[in-house]
Image (cartoon, rainbow, N blue to C red):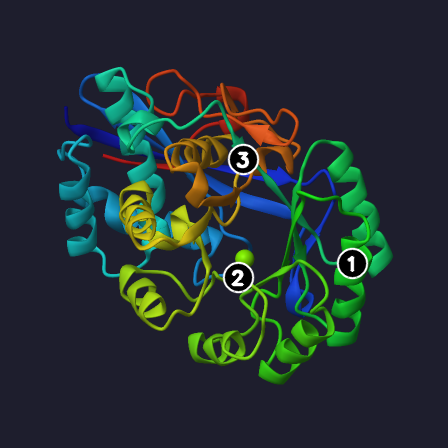
Amino acid sequence: MKIRRILAHRVELPLHETTYNWSGGKSVTVFDSTIIGVETDTGHIGYGEVCPLGPFYLPAYADGVRAGLRELGPHLIGEDPRQLVRLNRRMDAVLKGHPYVKSGIDIACWDLLGQSSGLPVCELLGGRYGEDVHLYRAISQDSPEAMADSVAGYRAEGYRRFQLKVGGDPDVDIARIRAVAAKLQPGDRLVADANTGWIQHEAIRVANAVRDIDVYIEQPCLTYEECLAVRRQIPQPFVLDETIDDLGILLRARSDLAMDVVNLKISKLGGLTKIRQARDLCVSLGIGMTLEDSWGGDIATAAIAHLAQSTPPEFLFSTTDFNSYVTVSTAEGAPERVDGRMAASTAPGLGIHPRPEVLGAPVFTVG
Ligand code: MG
């Protein structure tokens, strides 16, 4: 099996909630997603998706996905998409860095490996655990009252895990955490994700002010060193996200005991092949994980579901279903949330079938 052509589709994904807001006044209203098709000489097509959270979350942006694919694509024609480690080495040899550009190709090639072997990606990634996985809901930054109402509403829909977007004014953030915590029941799980929005003393103030609340603190500050300084001075369980983007920093963080849980995103690491390596290392080292992506629709959510359900449940802190946040369905067969949980497809590959009328014509093809 050889790669014959790479197709890039651009899809806009509006939100049911209209806007998604997080630290520093950052906000997205319509997500710009790239769906990548990898077509082979055997007539198979595998699909992947890359959808940055705007241009100001990670070092990634929507047009950058497509520019990168134009650069990378020609070097992959003729390669066997099923030989994933080899393919990743090829991608790293011909394009330095830009892991998010490579992520969509890698996901599409896992889809092809699954199609050609007759196995779901979940099983190829290590094995299927349980019937389904539990989901968290990200709560867009708003007033304390509005965020508490939002949590109560999503709780009624079945979610039991909530990630509050804080990282704003520390006094308001303290009120946000308190207002939301008042809506929770035993067994619910609460994360306050500052998305790098606090500086050290603010993070320590907020954490000290909510010492009586069962809450995790995620990525309080911009740099690894600032986060480590905060981590060493606060009592809450601690999550790192934005600063953990490769194995080197993951190992350093483990050595520093810098976190209890790590948030790994498929496109941040560079695809399923690389996130699997990090995931398996975390399992061996005893580190819990949130496994997800920066954003996306049906295809990104399918990839997340296969990754999450192939992870030993005690290490899966949470995962999410981005396809339920957006108003557009790009594929049939994608995971559907039931009572705050989702399951990976049992069909070969990702188990999704893109809707041609939604994808439209490719914005460009390579090969
Ligand atoms: Mg986060």
The reply to whether residue 169 is visible in this rendering is no
The x and y percentages for residue 252 are 31, 70
Amino acid marked by disc 2: Tyr
> How would you rate the neighbour count of disc 3 (Cα within 10 Å): few for under 14, some for 14-19, many for 20 or more?
many
Which secondary structure, mark 2?
loop
Residue linked to disc 1: 142
Q: Is mark 1 within 8 Å of ligand 1?
A: no
Amino acid marked by disc 3: Gly
The x and y percentages for residue 320 are 55, 40
- First in sequence: mark 3 vs mark 1: 1
The x and y percentages for residue 166 are 68, 64
- First in sequence: mark 3 vs mark 2: 2
Residue linked to disc 3: 297
Residue linked to disc 2: 57
- First in sequence: mark 2 vs mark 1: 2
Q: Nearer the viewer, mark 3 or mark 1?
A: 1
Q: Is residue 81 above or below residue 1?
A: below
- The quarter of the image holding the N terminus is top left
Amino acid marked by disc 1: Asp
Which secondary structure, mark 1?
loop
